């Protein structure tokens, strides 16, 4: 590493370096706190899990013991009482004084978010996996913070290319630092089925046996999936499984002949075309299959949502699509979950419990606007703004460009609460950055496309719109570069940002 990079990682973080931008930040002069070998982490009862996670990050780079206890006093203190009522269910209050850092929240989720802000306030090399030299100084500050939208998501497509649980966990750690609180796993598509379903075992063993371009593919056992869910939950991230239907279903159709209208299983598919596959809408076995899949997924998914896809069903007529969705949506409800679907589901006038996820490239969609008018909450993922698999520029080595090229400023400069005509702020559930993996094969590929764009999307979901300012944001984003270097994140060094 160059000496300049080392110096950038060692520099004390300025008070305005946090992403997403907090609601309110006030500098407190002469109130800096330095973490030392005698610092203790003190947690309220019920908050020791968050304290242990914070200690795990800080111990690696400082080499300090940083014992965690349910006590009160100086040092780093996490309290579940006394916070400003404005913090709500995910916000926090953070106060830095010469004697310590005090984080107060109404919930464990709020405390976790406060600890992520504390990481941003420490020198970048706090993220290193090996012991570094200090000092570990936090600037004197008072921060009051809470999210704009309840949903700030990232989607990872593990169907086109399979990614191991360890890679998924690393992505969870990376997105948690920016207060992303939903991970949407695209578990099934034409090219692969990635989760064991006990009642239909060939889905994993046959449907999961390949991927784009060939190769071994892979799948998650239920134990592995549950482990990912638990790992995410400890970091305030809820996992949402997606089984795309009625299209994007070739892996399932290849696994079970009876799911095809003609009773013949097609060959496994390793290409990247879309729109050619469909479940057989008229067969009863189709809905028994979906009932079994949803039942088994719901049993191992504690979060409220199951994503049923619904996009690019070009081999399903509109009449069949409506018939299909009107049978499938009640199945999701039957197992105690709420359905999310790509925005095409809006055209079937779904119940208001259903969340259409807008992925269009235009600014208007009459079906989505009508759904919002009826009371459905809309999840915003416009492909030409939020799709993390789009190329940055024409010379980007990986990614796609069908929705356009998305440089960092393009991905940051849009307002989810006023983007789609007649879908106002109150109708928006939040934002999500999908990362499709047709061209993505490694952890480094995932990171290259997600960083530096994902933090901007996280800021759109968390920070008040009044804080939105590209010129200020790109300064804060530049300060993340040394942090990512310390973490070993393979990020794209956009020329729009003056990296240190």
Image (cartoon, rainbow, N blue to C red):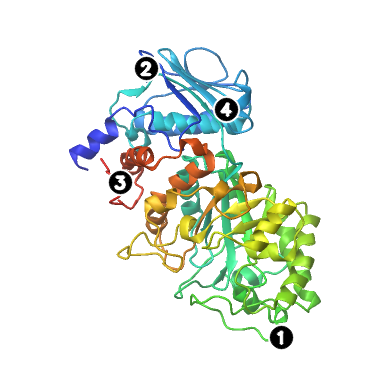
Mark 2 or 3, closer to the camera: 3
Query: On the picture, is 29 further left or further right than 338?
Result: left
Q: Answer with mark 4 or mark 1, whichever residue precedes in sequence.
A: 4
Mark 2 or 1, closer to the camera: 2
Determine whether 34 is above or below 279 in the image.
Answer: above
Q: Quadrant of residue 63?
A: top left
Determine whether 266 is above or below 405 in the image.
Answer: below
The residue tagged 3 is 497
Q: Is residue 389 visible?
A: yes
Spatial separation of the CA atoms under disc 1 and disc 3: 55 Å
Residue 48's label in the rendered image is 4
Q: Is residue 340 visible?
A: no
Q: Answer with mark 2 or mark 1, whichever residue precedes in sequence.
A: 2
Image quarter where the C terminus lies is: top left
The residue tagged 1 is 263
Spatial separation of the CA atoms under disc 4 and disc 1: 55 Å
Q: Secondary structure at mark 1?
A: loop
Q: Answer with mark 2 or mark 3, whichever residue precedes in sequence.
A: 2
Query: On the picture, is 346 further left or further right than 409?
Result: right
Mark 2 or 4, closer to the camera: 2
For the residues bearing labels 1 and 3, Cβ distance under 8 angstroms: no
The residue tagged 2 is 32
Other-residue count near label 1 (Cα within 10 Å), few / some / many at <14 / 14–19 / ≥20: few
Other-residue count near label 4 (Cα within 10 Å), few / some / many at <14 / 14–19 / ≥20: some
Q: Secondary structure at mark 3?
A: loop
């Amino acid at each position: 590493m160059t000496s300049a990079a080392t110096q950038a990682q060692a520099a004390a973080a300025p008070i305005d370096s946090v992403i997403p931008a907090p609601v309110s930040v006030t500098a407190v002069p002469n109130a800096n706190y330095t973490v030392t070998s005698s610092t203790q982490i003190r947690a309220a009862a019920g908050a020791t899990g968050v304290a242990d996670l914070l200690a795990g990050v800080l111990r690696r780079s400082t080499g300090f013991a940083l014992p965690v206890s349910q006590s009160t006093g100086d040092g780093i203190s996490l309290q579940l009482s006394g916070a400003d009522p404005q913090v709500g269910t995910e916000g926090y209050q953070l106060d830095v004084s010469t004697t310590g850092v005090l984080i107060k929240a109404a919930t464990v989720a709020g405390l976790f978010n406060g600890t992520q802000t504390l990481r941003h306030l420490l020198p970048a090399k706090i993220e290193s996996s090996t012991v570094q030299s200090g000092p570990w100084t936090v600037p004197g500050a008072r921060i009051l913070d809470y999210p704009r939208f309840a949903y700030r998501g990232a989607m990872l497509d593990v169907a086109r290319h399979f990614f191991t649980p360890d890679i998924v966990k690393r992505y969870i750690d990376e997105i948690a630092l920016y207060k992303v609180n939903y991970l949407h796993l695209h578990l099934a598509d034409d090219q692969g089925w990635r989760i064991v379903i006990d009642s239909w075992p060939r889905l994993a063993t046959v449907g999961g046996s390949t991927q784009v371009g060939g190769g071994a593919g892979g799948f998650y056992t239920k134990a592995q999936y549950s482990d990912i869910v638990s790992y995410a939950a400890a970091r305030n991230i809820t996992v949402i499984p997606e089984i795309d239907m009625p299209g994007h279903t070739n892996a399932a159709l290849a696994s079970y002949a009876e799911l095809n209208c003609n009773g013949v299983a097609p060959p496994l598919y390793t290409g990247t075309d879309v729109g050619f596959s469909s479940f057989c809408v008229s067969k009863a076995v189709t809905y028994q299959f979906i009932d079994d899949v949803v039942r088994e997924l719901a049993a191992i998914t504690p979060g409220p949502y199951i994503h049923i896809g619904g996009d690019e069903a070009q081999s399903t007529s509109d009449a069949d699509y409506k018939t299909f969705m009107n049978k499938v949506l009640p199945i999701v409800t039957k197992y105690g979950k709420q359905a999310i679907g790509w925005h095409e589901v809006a055209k079937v006038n779904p119940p208001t419990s259903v969340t259409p996820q807008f992925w269009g490239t235009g600014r208007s969609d009459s079906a989505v606007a009508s759904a919002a008018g009826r009371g459905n909450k809309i999840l915003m993922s416009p492909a030409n703004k939020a799709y993390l698999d789009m190329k940055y520029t024409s010379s980007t080595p990986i990614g796609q460009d069908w929705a356009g090229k998305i440089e960092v400023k393009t991905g940051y400069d849009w307002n989810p609460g006023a983007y789609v005509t007649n879908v106002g702020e109150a109708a928006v559930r939040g934002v999500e950055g999908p990362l499709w993996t047709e061209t993505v094969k490694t952890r480094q590929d995932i990171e290259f496309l997600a960083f530096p764009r994902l933090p901007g999307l996280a800021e759109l979901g968390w920070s008040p719109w009044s804080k939105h300012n590209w010129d200020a944001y790109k300064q804060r984003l530049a300060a993340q570069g040394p942090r990512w270097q310390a973490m070993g994140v393979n990020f794209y060094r956009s020329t729009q940002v003056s990296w240190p």
